[in-house]
Image: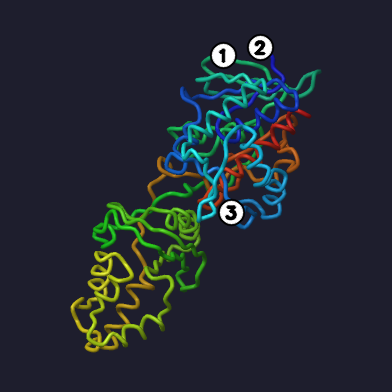
Amino acid sequence: MERVELAVVGAGAAGLMASIHAGRVGQSTVVLDGARVLGAKILVAGGGRCNVTHDEVDEGAYFGSTPAAIRRVLRAFDVPRTIEFFAALGVTLKREDTGKLFPVTDSSRTVLDALLRAAHEAGAELRHPRRVRDVERIDDVEGVGYVVRGDWGELYARRLILAMGGQSLPRSGSDGSGFALARTLGHHVTPRLLPALVALTLADGCFVRGLSGLAAETRIEVRAATGKRLHMRSGATLCTHFGLSGPAPMDISRCWQDALIDDPGAQLVVSWLPQETAASLDAALQALGPETPLRYLAARLPARLARALCEQAGVDPSTPGHALRREQRRALVHAVLDAPLPVTGTRGWANAEATAGGVPLSEVHLDTMESRVSPGLYLCGELLDVDGHIGGYNFQWAWSSGTLAGRGAARG
């Protein structure tokens, strides 16, 4: 059986980062990945531009494990270090108005090629397609080691890094098999595993589905059946033939799913004019005079959406403002600012950009990412119970946790 000092399973963002930093510490590394073409998730990220990170990242942008634990990992390899790391690889990042950082080339290929080149230069041997089917822990006179097997054969590694991703975008290779391997090695996985950063589907007949291609700046809230606001996100919303996509709906998708499990009456509420309150919008409608509500709304929203909202409120869009009755104004204010949408589900794992849930951070040493239950085993990236908002936060988690795992395994 082939014997190696360190094996990394998974050559995505976290796995490549781990192999680079392990090699830079002087550890020879074999990287195994089941894909024929490496880095599929990196290539499709950010619409093919790869949102490498965000200019401001802290634990408040993440869900899952405790904020203190997430903060500790992020601080070990923060945004300034990330920018310096990529600059040293020849990848200059630019900040956009949203705070997102992209390569100046606007190409994900720039990022992936730099990471692959850095891994090779660090001495990592990338072997693919080499899908790992199972891992066995071996305890003998030499200590703890791991036998890694697949249809390609098997090898023995004295130390092992699992960086296989979660379940999102399974065609890229992150199909949940990493969770199965973590369980066989003694780890737990959170009871809830949900597709995160995923578009939402709406019921047949919902007016939004008839507005496909239309985009607007919105505020989206998840509310309990009692009406209490549980979560809120603001940003662009894209109406599609199936429901809602774009940054705001995708960002809040995991919150809606999570809330619905505990509260079947939870609702998703969209404000199409987030800068307005019920009082300010009602006052504006009262002051319209001969101007129609359609003209007022169309000056602030796409015309098709403005007309649809009037129809949803049961208000004739050509009615002069001074002729609007109090109940008509209230109905229109409700339709524009406070109407629940009939969400039926999500677009599922095949279209999700992240996984909510995973191995709890309490099961790893946060300074090295080494397992607390199986010495010589390290975990990083999406395999762990950490998922971030849209905007580069999940990549930052991969860079931070992957760096710690690589350095920890090399020095272990």
- What SS does tag 1 mark? strand
x%, y% of residue 317? Answer: 21, 76
Three-letter residue code for mark 2: Glu
* Label 2 sits on residue: 2
- When asked about the image quadrant of residue 238, the answer is bottom left
Q: Nearer the viewer, residue 216 or 398?
A: 216
97 or 108, nearer to the observer: 97
Residue 352 occupies which quadrant of the picture?
top left
Q: Residue at x 62, y 52 (%)?
A: 57
With respect to residue 142, does 213 lie above or below?
A: below
Q: Is residue 266 visible?
A: no
> Pointers 2 and 1 in contact (CB under 8 A)?
yes
* Number of the front mark, 1 or 3: 3
Looking at the image, which residue sits at the far right? 141
In percent of the image, x 71 and y 48: which residue is there?
75
- Residue 58 picture location, percent across and down: 64, 54
- Label 2 neighbourhood size at 10 Å, few (<14), some (14-19), many (20+)? few
Identify residue type, mark 1. Answer: Gly
What's the mark number on residue 63?
3
Residue 153's label in the rendered image is 1
Looking at the picture, tell me which residue is in the foreground, 127 or 280. Answer: 280
Looking at the picture, which amino acid does disc 3 mark?
Phe
Instruction: Give the percent coordinates (x, y) of residue 54.
Output: 57, 50
Marks 1/3: CA–CA distance: 38 Å
CA gap, disc 2 and disc 1: 10 Å
Q: Quadrant of the C terminus?
A: top right
> On the rendered image, what quadrant is the N terminus found in?
top right
Q: Residue furthest top?
A: 1
Residue 183 place in picture, x, y as percent: 61, 35
Q: Residue at x 59, y 55 (%)?
A: 61
How packed mark 1 is, by other alpha carbons closer than 10 Å (few <14, some 14-19, many 20 or more), is few
